[in-house]
Image (spheres, rainbow, N blue to C red):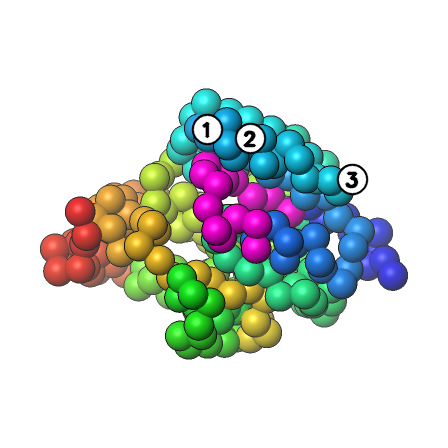
Amino acid sequence: MTYENKTFAFLMCAHKLDDFLPLAIDSVLKQTYIDFKFYIIANNCDDDLWSYLSGLKDHRIEIYRTKIGQLAFNLNYGINLISADYVIRFDSDDICLPDRLSNTANALKKFEYPDVLSGSAQWIDVNGRVLKDQSVFMESEEIKKRLWWNNPVCHPATAISLNTLVSHGGYSWGFGSEDYDLWLRLARSTKTRFVRVPEIYIQYRISGNQSKGGILPYSESVGLMFRELFFTKKIRFFFGGLLWIIKALLKGKR
């Protein structure tokens, strides 16, 4: 089955070999919709990870190695290699549900190919136990209006138009908020369309290794809010900056 000749490529960055990585890779390879490329960028990795990745036998996989550990750089490195219509983002500790790509393709067609399509996520712990479902439907304007408050787009559950990514300069910066920065920049344009669907696309793993909740991404978000205030002249980003300062002070983990 084809979807108006749209092509897809998964993009994953990984920097270490742990118990989660084989599960994540296997969940991509077992998609019910099988026509895709799978780019894995081994960033600042050791030889154990590279040896493992080199041993993977699937014609859809392409692996590359870099010396730089920053996620934004490695995502851009992967984007530069990809020629598909949509980049399917995914992280190395999460699980794709088997119908993720087929559901993504159907939703893209249903919503007339938005720039960013996000699925919803089921949160799991390090043992794979379900913590909660975050099943949410949002259309473009609601997502754009909520960006001052939080990040409503589930990055590892997204399909992003390659043309949109490239035309907006790809990922710009950040050690824990590269996706938030991207959505804010995309949202400045009235032509950019977001959709978040309620269907669960991934199992999103909560673990102690994440940057989520750390002082660095909170601090970066403060800067993003005031940047957007000056770019857009929208007062909600001033209040967003104050909100992220409070979050950084009260919740930030060093």
Q: Between marks 1 and 2, how big is the CA–CA gap?
A: 7 Å
Check if mark 1's residue and mark 2's residue have beta carbons within 8 Å. Answer: yes
Residue type beneath disc 2 = Trp
Q: Which residues are magenta?
A: 10-23
Work out which quarter of the rendered image holds the N terminus and state it: bottom right
Which disc is residue 46 wearing?
Answer: 1
Q: Position of residue 202 (x, y in %)?
A: 55, 64
Q: Which mark is residue 59?
A: 3
Mark 3 vs mark 2: in front: 2
Residue 179: percent from the left, percent from the top?
Answer: 44, 48
> Along the polypeptide, which appears first: circle 3 or circle 1?
1
The residue sitting at 61% across, 50% down in the picture is 25
At 34% from the left and 51% from the top, the residue drawn is 210
Q: Circle 3: is it few (<14), some (14-19), or many (20+) Cα within 10 Å?
A: few
The answer to whether residue 25 of the structure is visible from this angle is: yes
Residue on which disc 2 sits: 50
Q: Are marks 3 and 2 in contact (CB under 8 Å)?
A: no
- Residue 16 forms part of the magenta stretch: yes
> In the current view of this chain or complex, which residue is farthest to the left?
249
Residue 97 forms part of the magenta stretch: no
Left/right of residue 139 with respect to residue 63 in the rendered view: left
Q: Residues within 10 Å of mark 1 (few under 14, many from 20)?
A: few
Whether residue 4 sits left or right of residue 193 in the image: it is: right
- What numbered label is drawn on residue 36? none
**Dot 1 amino acid type:** Asp
- Identify the amino acid type marked 3: His
Q: Residue at coordinates 58% horizontally, 31% vertically from top-left?
A: 51
Whether residue 191 is visible to the viewer of this picture, yes or no, is no
